[in-house]
Image (cartoon, helix red, strand yellow):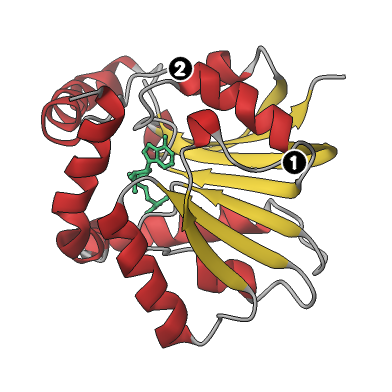
């Protein structure tokens, strides 16, 4: 099975537990806050076309929709199980006029050039089999004056934090096919000007603001 199919089948398997784990208070509260801050960093004025890469169960679609009057948000994923969940959320939250989801592999996206005003990816870049190809695709489908916000995990520079990080990183690799030690900033750097705009959990979680290189 190719890496991409393995990732998709892992998330297909997890789709019914995903929100339950994420809503667990010790994880859920801070994550919700970080995601809200990432959405605020999109600086939406209301008429943008926004892409949520690897939308999963569509956790951030409702909040993004609340910023959009005439704009649209599209969530994409390669896991059919996750897409089923996000569709249900859109129906339940009554945001179908603004939000939609569809199957799209961001490493080989079906969207045209210069299509999105904003791109957001929360905890997706560490799960992608080929993040460099994704960086290229994002710079292709994002408008030249657009903005991308990436919230994800990474190696902390603090030595004590690193000791806590190692077991988390190894179990995420083993059970989640997630590469918490990936240097996403360095990967995005070939196509984007990247700025780290905040860090949480002693640097284990951070947000990047990315603009296409001129
Ligand atoms: C850790 S989950 C994050 C979900 C959501 N963004 C969140 O914050 O809750 C990563 C998601 O990325 C999706 N994904 C992985 N590779 C992908 C790809 N090449 N294209 C689109 N989505 C992908 C997975 O199927 C999964 O739903």
Label 2 close to label 1 by CB (< 8 Å): no
Relative to 66, say whether 155 is above or below.
above
User: In the visual, does 158 lie left or right of 192?
Assistant: left
> Looking at the image, which residue is at 21% across and 25% down?
169
Q: Does the residue labelled 2 lie within 8 Å of ligand 1?
A: no
Instruction: Tell which quarter ligand 1 is in.
Output: top left
Residue 133 percent coordinates (x, y): 53, 20
> Looking at the image, which residue is at 19% across and 26% down?
173
Residue of label 1: 147
Few, some or many C-alpha atoms within 10 Å of disc 2 (few <14, some 14-19, many ≥20)?
some
- Which label was assigned to residue 61? none
2 vs 1, front mark: 1
Relative to 197, say whether 41 is above or below.
below
Q: In which quarter of the image is the N terminus?
A: top left
Give the alpha-carbon distance from disc 2 to disc 1, as whole Å: 20 Å
Name the element at disc 2: loop
Name the element at disc 1: strand
Residue 157 percent coordinates (x, y): 41, 16
Few, some or many C-alpha atoms within 10 Å of disc 1 (few <14, some 14-19, many ≥20)?
many
Q: Which of marks 2 and 1 is nearer the N terminus?
A: 1
Residue of label 2: 183
Which of 157 and 211 lies nearest the eye of the viewer?
A: 211
């Amino acid at each position: 099975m190719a890496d991409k199919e393995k990732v998709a089948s892992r998330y297909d398997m997890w789709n019914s537990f995903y929100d339950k784990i994420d809503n667990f208070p010790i994880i859920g509260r801070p994550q919700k806050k970080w995601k809200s801050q990432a959405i605020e960093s999109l600086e939406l004025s209301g008429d943008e076309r926004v892409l949520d890469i690897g939308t999963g169960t569509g956790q951030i679609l409702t909040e993004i929709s609340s910023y959009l009057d005439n704009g649209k948000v599209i969530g994409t994923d390669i896991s059919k199980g996750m897409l089923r969940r996000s569709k249900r959320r859109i129906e339940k939250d009554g945001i179908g006029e603004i939000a939609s989801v569809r199957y799209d592999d961001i490493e080989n996206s079906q969207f045209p050039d210069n299509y999105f005003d904003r791109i957001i990816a929360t905890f997706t870049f560490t799960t992608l089999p080929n993040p460099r190809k994704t960086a290229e695709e994002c710079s292709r489908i994002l408008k030249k004056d657009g903005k991308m916000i990436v919230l994800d995990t990474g190696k902390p520079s603090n030595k004590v934090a690193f000791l806590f990080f190692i077991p988390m990183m190894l179990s995420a690799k083993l059970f989640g096919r997630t590469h918490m030690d990936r240097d996403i900033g360095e990967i995005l750097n070939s196509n984007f000007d990247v700025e780290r705009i905040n860090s949480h959990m002693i640097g284990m979680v951070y947000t990047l603001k990315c603009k296409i290189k001129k």
